[in-house]
Image: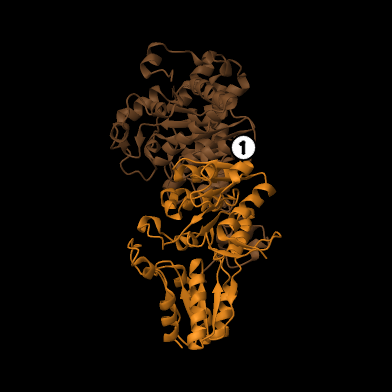
Amino acid sequence: MPSPTEDEVAVDPVDFSKAEVNANLTPDEKMGILRQMLRIRRFEQVSLKYYNQGAMGGFLHLYIGQEAVAVGTVSLLGKNDHVITAYRDHGHALSVGMSMNECMAELLGKATGCSRGKGGSMHFFAPDKNYWGGHGIVGGQTPLGLGLAYGLKYHGLKGCALCFMGDGAVNQGAYHESLNLAALWKLPVVYIIENNKYSMGTTLDRSSAMRNCLAERADGYGIVWDIANGEDLYEVRAKTANAMRRAHEQSLPTVLEIDTYRYYGHSVADANAKKYRAADEIERYKTHHDPIRLWKKRLLEEGVTTDAAMDAMDNEIKLEANASAEFALASENPSPESIFEDVYWEVDNNTEAGNTGRHFFGD
Amino acid sequence: MPLITYRKALNDALAEEIMRDENVVLMGEEVARYNGAYKVTEGLWERFGDKRVVDTPISEAGFIGMGIGASMLGIRPVMELMFWSFAYVAWDQIINNAGQVRYMSGGLINCPIVIRGPANGGTNVGATHSHTPENFIANTPGLKVVCPATAYDAKGLMKTAIRDNDPVCVMENTLLYGESWEVPEEEYTIPLGVADIKREGTDVSLIAHGRAVITALKAAEILAAEHGIHAEVLDLRSIRPLDEEAIMKTVCKTHRAVLVDENKPFCGVSAQISSMIMEQCFDELDAPVQRVCALDAPAIYSPALEPIQLPTVQRIISKTLQIL
């Protein structure tokens, strides 16, 4: 496969703003991208505050630092393009257009949450926006993404499935089985490895055998692969657009590894978040590689906007995030009866099948 | 009524549903060109072609998960497991994805998928190929599971399973594939969650599912002929949903129950049935509920011994005589 190595990219940097998919962006669209990245960051900062106050249970896997990946890729989606991801799912959910209210309420386990309080942080869904979750088991979503692509092809629709995963998921068997099927059956799926360099607390070099990068493993399946710098929104869009074009035009899969970084631990409950990596590493990323900071700089250089306008946008988004917390706190808990709802379609829809035989046991 | 095999009944059900609904796709290892490892899908690839009957690699986690994903987009995949024992390499997909995605999405998603294949011991293929996971599936709210015992039930339940909008696991039996029963030519379906009295009786209820029903029927015949005991045989057909009413009705009629189950005894399906009878029909019982399960060890290979590891006619008779 004619895939560049990291060295080649470093030696011959490309200005991805010139890529067709980026050259055509309007100033409004560029500001829209900033807005989406800021929404993720501010939403998660507020969620962290309430998590630390004990307002929510379970885990909270923050996406902060990786925003350009979800926003850049999702900004390319058309009517028949679908998204599915793992448990670090808030960024993708907000990117596809889910509201902060429904997401924050889900974090607090409220009836107004996107999953009616049944999924929590790891399980956000919005099929009406082609967003299929939010999946808790590492790598478990990779065959599902394949199935979305299969469904599109079966229906004769020109679309693709973007299936996101972390660098820790590449060692799961389900992912390799999916790659084999994707290549064998020419399915329009794009596996996007968001390589934040740590699978929980284990560094990349201690978890994955490879030559140059994780995506390169696709060679074994004859799948085209590429790598992208996840702090450069233009590059994320340009390379994702190539992969999507391959899916749309040739019904072929791609593995795209996007280099990125998370500022927080694996989850907020990650007690060793600051032990398995040096503090200056985190600071270096925040200072030099922050995708929002870099995008703002771009917009200023391009004369798209001003600091004042961006600050105003940011303030507005902070208000939106705080309002979502108020909405979530004020929302009702799900009713005890709802425990038995959403288990079986036939029962929920009160069909003859749903009313035949006993579906639930116990008291 | 024509006599057809359990295998042919399933084959007819699959063919009829492929013709009825353009979204029905059969997938699995060797289902197409090879005509099925157990010939359940024989001739279907020739009739319906590559789009509707698809050979998969040996990759259960991959293709079962793929089917689940496709079902979220409205495809109705009917996935063959060459043996249900192979489901264990796809367990995360079946339990966590097919079983939980509706719930975790607050009802936004449903998975109209069927996963089918044989789930039985008794064929000397060793412990890894002889599992009967209906109890595991039934322990997972979100999934449904049926275990047909006859060709008639196999066809009717399969058609209903394919039309159902929830994930349904159909557990067949290689020892029944070649057996024949009367099956009407006209179309019919059998609802999930409706048990069937396979033999009327008054003295004791033998409650079973899958091939254990056939064993129970043989025992009932001998009990009548040699002991003058009239056993009623209730075939559960569907484990989840479960026809609780039929269970209580037969127990209230005969006041004695022997549960016959090819599951292992610990947390097997009959353990649940026994508990329900105790809770709901305690005053109707004239004797403790008895269970006849597979002997509680991994399935043995030895052709000489395996037949006695599964519930036998003799064990059913002996347990029945203990309470009469």
Q: Residues within 10 Å of mark 1 (few under 14, many from 20)?
A: some
Q: Chain of mark 1?
A: A
What is the x, y in percent for residue A177?
44, 38
- Residue drawn 58% across the image and 33% down it: A316
Q: Nearer the viewer, residue A195 or A360?
A: A360
- Residue drawn 50% across the image and 22% down it: A239
What is the x, y in percent for residue A116?
57, 52
| Secondary structure of the residue carrying numbered label 1 | helix
Does A331 sit above or below residue A132?
Answer: below
Does B242 sit above or below residue A191?
Answer: below
How many tags in the picture? 1
Q: Quadrant of residue A245?
A: top right
Residue type at the position of mark 1: Tyr
Q: Quadrant of residue A95?
A: top right
Does B17 sit above or below residue A70?
Answer: below
Residue with the most extreme top position: A12
Does A99 sit above or below residue A284?
Answer: below
Q: Nearer the viewer, residue B209 or A156?
A: B209
Q: Which residue is mark 1?
A: A154
Residue A134 appears in the rendering = no
Instruction: Give chain A's shade.
Output: brown
Q: Which quadrant of the figure contains the N terminus of chain A?
A: top left
What is the x, y in percent for residue B254?
55, 85
- Residue drawn 50% across the image and 52% down it: B38
Residue with the most extreme right position: B186
B157 relative to A86 in the view: left or right? right
A163 relative to A159 in the view: left or right? left
Q: Nearer the viewer, residue A306 or B189?
A: B189
Which lettered chain is shown in orange?
A: B
